[in-house]
Amino acid sequence: MRRSIATVCLSGTLADKLSAASGAGFDGVEIFENDLLAAPSSPAELRVRCADLGLAVELYQPFRDAEALPPDAFARVLRRAERKFDVMAGLGADTVLMCSSTSPEAIDDDDLAAEQLHALAERAGARGLRIAYEALAWGRHVSTWDHSWEIVRRAGHPSLGLCLDSFHVLSRGSDPSAFAAVPADRLFFLQLADAPHLSMDVLEWSRHHRLFPGQGAFDLPGFLGNVLAAGYRGPLSLEVFNDVYRQSDPARTAVDAMRSLVHLEEELGRAPAVSALRDRPALTAPPRAPELTGHAFAEIGVDAVSRPVLGHALETLGFTHTGQHRSKPVERWQQGDATVLLNAASLLAGDLGQAVVGALAVSSDDPDASVARAEALRAPVLPRSKGPAEADMAAVAAPDGTSVFFARTRGNWMADFLPTGDEPDAGTGITRIDHVGLSQPFDHADEAFLFYRAVLGLAPETSNEFAAPFGLVRSRTVVDRSRRVRLALSVAVLRRGEWAPGVPDPQYVAFATDDVVATGRALRAAGAPLLRIPDNYYDDLDARLALDPDLLAGLREVGALHDRDAHGGYFHLATTVLGSRVFFEVVQRTGEYAGHGSVDAPIRMAAQRRHRLDPD
Amino acid sequence: MRRSIATVCLSGTLADKLSAASGAGFDGVEIFENDLLAAPSSPAELRVRCADLGLAVELYQPFRDAEALPPDAFARVLRRAERKFDVMAGLGADTVLMCSSTSPEAIDDDDLAAEQLHALAERAGARGLRIAYEALAWGRHVSTWDHSWEIVRRAGHPSLGLCLDSFHVLSRGSDPSAFAAVPADRLFFLQLADAPHLSMDVLEWSRHHRLFPGQGAFDLPGFLGNVLAAGYRGPLSLEVFNDVYRQSDPARTAVDAMRSLVHLEEELGRAPAVSALRDRPALTAPPRAPELTGHAFAEIGVDAVSRPVLGHALETLGFTHTGQHRSKPVERWQQGDATVLLNAASLLAGDLGQAVVGALAVSSDDPDASVARAEALRAPVLPRSKGPAEADMAAVAAPDGTSVFFARTRGNWMADFLPTGDEPDAGTGITRIDHVGLSQPFDHADEAFLFYRAVLGLAPETSNEFAAPFGLVRSRTVVDRSRRVRLALSVAVLRRGEWAPGVPDPQYVAFATDDVVATGRALRAAGAPLLRIPDNYYDDLDARLALDPDLLAGLREVGALHDRDAHGGYFHLATTVLGSRVFFEVVQRTGEYAGHGSVDAPIRMAAQRRHRLDPD
């Protein structure tokens, strides 16, 4: 099926937007009127430009407040429509979006609306054009898709059909299976947008918080399956009004948008409504996401100043430096199934003392399929650089620049390392990597969420927002089916400003233990750089939860934070910030606790700030 | 009256917040529990710290989900409360805020709520403490202040009273005049917050969008007048949950907060409910804002590269270089009553080619009173630097760093300039400065709005938000009573990121004309650096408004943009960006049009971007 994107999804001028849409491989665009008005090229010149870029002009939009008007106002509408039909003729767009009126002048009279839309359709049809009528969720008298269909049905004109927009339909809670009642030749256009569940005015929700499919909470595969089952075969067109995308690099956004469509088509292929179709539309299907079996390693980029800081931290956490890479300045540190690499060759130039989580590796049952899937989903596959006798490990670049490696579950990548001769000792109880926490660039947080969801096949686990000492933070976790690979993605809700003396874009690796107090004691004894947590915190824990006094004393002794949800408990210890932005955590889960204790993150952040102001 | 601020209003750790509150001159604070939990000092140590800073601990807050519970849950509440009373004893706080329950466990039973609050009050009273009960606007069973009063009344305990919060009362549309029915000794605490009108979930509205008094849309003077008329004499305490303030410099925010209280007290002094009181509380009253009579001048900081660019622009706009400052490298340019100064000594170091609106001057009937008022409102008064025989002109620094001068309406500041010998010629029809447009730093947009409102006595005129090519922009205009001084303040809704190739933080000076087409023709003839506006824009103007063809042709010829509202029309011409971020506009108003044509700003911005990419 043809893939299209509305220019309103992208930042920049119309020239920027068209280049971005073409660059990401879209087949067509919806031209948003305001973008056209600000463009110096005539509609005919834009038609040529779009053709040169391989883009069809699938829709011109929006034409507002057209119907159910008093005669004089409708006369002005007819004049305006003819002018816009001129523009469409120039652009080579055959369909215009008319959205249900929000005008205070509009009359609550379906017959009048149908009559006037018929008159408009008659004029459009005479010029070979079509009108796609859409119910805005906040339309004055017409605010549901079935009401818009009733008006189109009454008008009964071949040049008048429906535009279905997933936001307007799903935000109103309408049932998309009812689309089946609409003849396929009345389904003129389809606009797709996801959104988070928000309790707010629907207009504001729509104009500021739409997302690309797979980034929000709507059932887009179910919606689209019903539209296709009803016979729609026009383009799949994204229309996403989003405050962040309005101001971020349109070339990046367009790739993100394309990924969302490819992923949606994949999910759709499995939707019952579509599987049952005889005449199935052509849909893409990247290789399925192979099963992941855990975090193979996390790699931290270090420099000459930060390497000993990180090395000391790992040593006091009970890790052993077991291997040295054959050809690169990379150290392998191990404890239990947890592996951390310190890479002294990966950092770009910057301030001395930097440390960055530069890569993470997941164990995949089929790394080749993982890479093929990543490519199909427009993830940038990184060049492989291997020396003789080194494992050939493929990687893709995540939106925040982190390299994501696919290690063969029973693979031999460890052979890249020459043993140091040191064998792991009894350790401190750390068993494996529980999760990796990565703060995301403000402009790319939703892109990153979709990236991990689509490319790695991870599923959303928890989502929340909390007031950190230096501003609100939004956090989402994603996990694989076996809950062995888990990532915590966070973003500053408002982008960080000049004040905000916290750690910029913190990153961490959280290690699992089965006994946080015992591990904490071993770490304290070894001199690990653990945070000091205020007594006030434990007094409150006692007041709220009336914990067993021995447990409370143990937590207080080692400085562990504690959260509970309906399914289980969570205990977590954190180190000070090592280098510029990295720290480690040691965590214990009981029961089926989900998430990563973000309710306590402000306590941890304040302690990290104190340590930076006043190191012990 | 005592002035207090809740620590939750401010960014940072508790240490940062207390220093900021003290620095701004507050008498006390509300300690927000989460701030305490993250602090390393014990409650007793914090009591000493607050005393050292001159701060009383007016309130400890919040204690949640205390009342109307099943017996076992209430037993846990009593245990928790005793622990928190310990904390309060340490802090030296005698009042705790208990907010109405949001727990799913809470029972809809006012008698049970009263009985349990009575039991809590009994324990509090035994320790010399008080409980202030507050109805959250989203409380499960108690969500209005009158309902909370009914429960307090039924409980009938001297240690149990009300906390009134302007947000919870006004967001629910309750009538504050009914406070008169509550005995004064039951009014334990008062929290003040303003907010914009927003249609959204009230909890989200409250937690993210509260503002300091005078920054939003609530009638705070009316609210507070009613609270005082009911006999309340406790502290005036600000409780503002705001996403921007959560992450901006707390020292700045605290001063802004103090300004809002001083201004509120001033407005309150005139409120009927308070004027009528026999026993009036002590309220501040800065000198009233003197009448302003216009923009005396706008000053643009230039360097060696930008000076000739700005000079050429002014010349082609029809201005004459009429004077040179006696002691500084400042040129005076004039046309009609419009005066622009080019100051080659004011820029801080930076890239060559900068140009910045560094100062604006308003004509005041009483500059001394203007300055005294600014000082009373905590505006930073700038040092005066005058040479012999120069006018002594006072200035204050606005939140964005702009200097605001107060020029005597019939003053002699022009004497600072030696005549160049050139006299203004017939000019191009520019009569005066219509307004100055200043984009505000993201962290200080609401602060700036309040600054101009309080310090200069300007009134809000229009407020809107529009989708610019590189992100959403919010814009507010403020005007003086005579509508001769007008400022357009704008801010990027999400702070600008790496993409956003538009002009960073644009600023402009808009000059008035009575005939934009005639002035535009003169400017084109003189070679002024006017923008080219696309034909698509005029075709749309024609389609929408069916303008008189001659007028449309004139607008198209000169490149003027056009907006209309219910009261009048607006025509505006803009130049390209001169230097790094400054441009000029020429505008014509008809009727009583308010605002500044921001609906067309995206057209102007796209044209400015094109010009920067591809100068003529």
Image (cartoon, coloured by chain):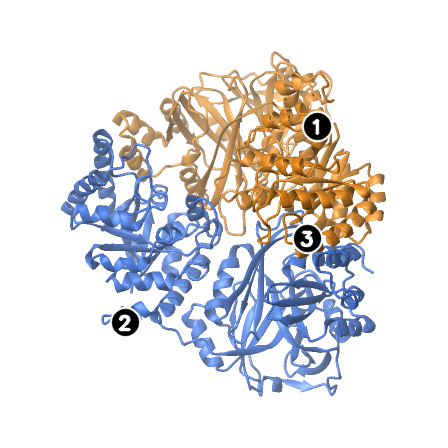
Chain colours: A orange, B blue
Q: Quadrant of residue B42?
A: top left
Q: Which is more foreground, mark 1 or mark 2?
A: 1
- Disc on res. A184: 1
**Discs 3, 2: same chain:** no
Is B27 situated left or right of B552 in this image?
Answer: left
Residue A271 in view (yes/no): no
Name the element at disc 1: helix
Q: Secondary structure at mark 2?
A: loop
Circle 3 crowding by C-alpha within 10 Å: few under 14, some 14–19, many from 20: some
Name which residue type carries label 3. Answer: Phe
User: Viewer-proximal residue, A236 or B404?
Assistant: A236
Residue drawn 23% across and 58% down? Answer: B181
Residue A292 at what x, y percent from top left?
A: 58, 17
Q: Is residue B238 left or right of residue A369?
A: left
Quarter that holds the N terminus of chain A = top right
According to the picture, the residue beneath numbered tag 2 turns out to be B276
Tell which subunit mark 2 falls on. Answer: B
Quadrant for residue B70, please give it: top left
Q: Given contact means CB atoms under 8 Å apart, are the residues at marks 1 and 2 in contact? A: no
Q: Where does residue A315 sit, x and y in percent of width and height?
A: 48, 26
Q: Position of residue A89 (x, y in %)?
A: 82, 45
Calculate the distance from the C-alpha at mark 3 to the C-alpha at mark 2: 56 Å
Q: Which residue is mark 3?
A: A74
Residue A234 seen by the camera = yes
**Is disc 1 in the same subunit as disc 3?**
yes
User: In the rendered structure, the residue with mark 1 lies on which chain?
Assistant: A
> Mark 1 is on which residue type?
Ala
- Give left or right: position of B347 versus A55: left
Distance, label 1 to label 3, CA atoms, is: 29 Å
Q: CA distance from mark 1 to mark 2?
A: 72 Å
